[in-house]
Structure formats: structure tokens, C-alpha cells
Amino acid sequence: MVTLESYLSGRRDLVDRNLDLALPQVDNDSLLHKAMRYSVFAGGKRIRPILALAAAEVVGGSHESVLPLAVALECIHTYSLIHDDLPAMDNDDLRRGKPTVHKLFGEAVAILAGDALLTFAFQVMSSPSSVRTHPPERLLAVINDLATASGFEWLVEGQYLDISHEGESVGPETVRSIMLSKTAALIRTSLICGARLAGGMDWEIQALAVYGENMGMIFQIRDDLLDIEGDPSELGKAARKDLGRGKATLPRIVGVEGAREAMRAYTTLALDALSPLGTRSSMLSEICRYISERTN
Ligand code: GRG
């Protein structure tokens, strides 16, 4: 039987190898190329790509055929972190225990590295080898899902809401909408796209979308709880920064216990969504539990 730890580390290695092959090599003096690789290989958990690979397997597909999607998801995620850390946004000096991209390479290169990674995701998805591997309508639907999740309706909107509500007193609906757009939408899309690209049926994709959305909410609440009670040496960044900035987070408005309770409710919804998929989704159930207990 494959344990969760060995599944996650095996998948992480696979994603890393594919990112390594796909990204520009740094055999020149380009700071842009160096910054792209630095940010991608700074120690991320690869949770979005892993969820996409797992979703492909749950619907009976092979994870190999969704590796370019895995690369694209991590590039989009990394771009969002680089831009989120910029002085004009959250102004962070450390991420994953290392200097942020703008601290090491300067702001202009950090902006460009983020731009390049976002664009590269779509270059990978629409490459001749992707076009040869997947039916065109399926590939186009996935590219559309990715673009929608990354843009003004979800990821960028989430960041905008996050920044514009800083220091304000907000209600639970606003917090929910921030969590959904800045975090849960890309996680949901990782599952949808993995399943869609692997030829999943509509009901399977729908079940995985509901799981993914609830998992995304758990992911964000856990992140907010870690900001309050996490160990900075494990987090690789300063703790209590969001509290200090007056970020609109769930623990801030309902307290730590209230946030834990909400996380339990989202866990029930996520696990319930998997039940029609039966035992083939057991690794996704375990990933959900891991995410709600993660320490970094
Ligand atoms: C700048 C367009 C734009 C969006 C930024 C991702 C984001 C939106 C902001 C980062 C801050 C934050 C708390 C985002 C919520 C999602 C989240 C918890 C990101 C961290 O993801 P992990 O834990 O990161 O998967 P690793 O380090 O494992 O890759």
C-alpha cells in the first residue's frame, strides 16, 4: 500500500523533474531565467500539480498525459507568489525560508519573472506536443479553465479584494469571497483540469470540483491559522504578519476556534463530494486531511 508521504514525495519529484526540463536552463547570464528557476525551485509543496495528477488517476487516466498541466499550474502559482511578495503588494522579504525574488533580483526582474511564468504556463499548454496528445476541444476547454481561474474573475480578483480590504472590518461573506477567489479557485481548477484532460466524465469532474473548492477553503483557513499559531522556522516566513496588517481572514473575524470549526465543516463537504467516486479517491481524502493539519 502506498502511504500518503511516499505518494506526495514521489509525485513532487515527478513534478520537479518536469519543471526542470521545461524551464529555461541557466547556462547564460540572464537574471530573468535565474529568477524564474529560483522561484520555482525554492521549496514549494507542489500541491496544485499533485492534485491535478491525482484527479487524472481518479478518472482512470494516466498521470503522464497531464504532466504539462502540472508544470503550467505550478508556474501560475509561482507567478502569483512572486507578485504577491512585491513591495506594492504584501512587501515580504522571506518566502519558504529564503529571500523573496525581488529581494534577490530586484523589483523589475521579479515582475518580469512573474510575467514570464504566467505566460509560459499557456505556452506549455498549447505546445505542439500538447496539441498532439489531447483532443483539441478538451485541450481548449482546459486552457480556458486555466485562464479564467488565473484572471480578473478569480486569482487576480482575489488578490485585489485581499489588498483592498486590508485594515477594514469585514463580514464573513467578504472573507469567504476572498478565500474562494485568491486560493480555492486555482485549487478547484487543478482538479477540474486534471480530470478533464484525462477524459473524465462530467459527473466525475463535478464531484472533483466540489472537493477542490472545499479543499481550497481548508487550505486557506489552515494558512491563516498558521499565521497566528505557526512556527516561523517551519513556515519559512514571519508569523503573525497577516494579523499585523489587518488582513481580512476568517480567524480574525470568528476567532481561532471558529476557524477550526469552519475547517471541519469544509472537510466534511470535501469528503462527501468524493463518496460517489468510491475507493479510487482514497488518496484525495488523505490529502484533504493532510492539508487541514499541515504545518507549513
Ligand atoms: C499576485 C495575482 C496575484 C495573486 C496572488 C497566491 C496569492 C494571490 C497570494 C499569496 C498569499 C496567499 C496567502 C495566498 C493564498 C494561497 C496560498 C496559501 C498560497 C501559498 O501556497 P502554498 O502553501 O505555497 O501551496 P508553496 O510554498 O507550497 O508553493
Image (cartoon, helix red, strand yellow):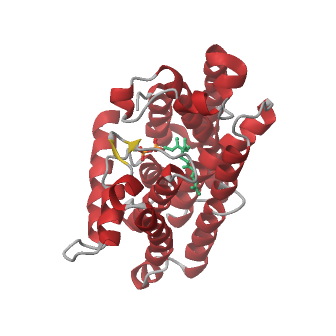
Q: Quadrant of the N terminus?
A: top left
Q: Nearer the viewer, residue 89 or 153?
A: 89
Q: Residue at x 71, y 20 (%)?
A: 254
Image-based side of 36 in relation to 134, left or right: left
* Residue 93 image position (x, y, % from top left): 41, 44
Q: Quadrant of the C terminus?
A: top left
Q: Residue at x 30, y 54 (%)?
A: 41
Q: Residue at x 28, y 43 (%)?
A: 9
* Residue 187 image position (x, y, % from top left): 56, 49
Quarter occupied by residue 195: bottom right
Vertical relation: 296 (above or below) 138: above
* Residue 182 image position (x, y, % from top left): 63, 48
How many numbered dots are placed on residues in this image?
A: 0
Image-based side of 196 in relation to 206, left or right: left
**Which residue is most to the top?**
257
Quarter occupied by residue 215: top right
Vertical relation: 128 (above or below) 20: below
Q: Residue at x 67, y 24 (%)?
A: 252
Whether residue 1 is visible here, answered yes or no, is no
* Residue 51 image position (x, y, % from top left): 47, 49
Image-based side of 44 in relation to 251, left or right: left
Whether residue 45 is visible here, answered yes or no, is yes
**Which residue is most to the left?**
27
Q: Nearer the viewer, residue 187 or 110?
A: 110
Q: Nearer the viewer, residue 210 or 156?
A: 156
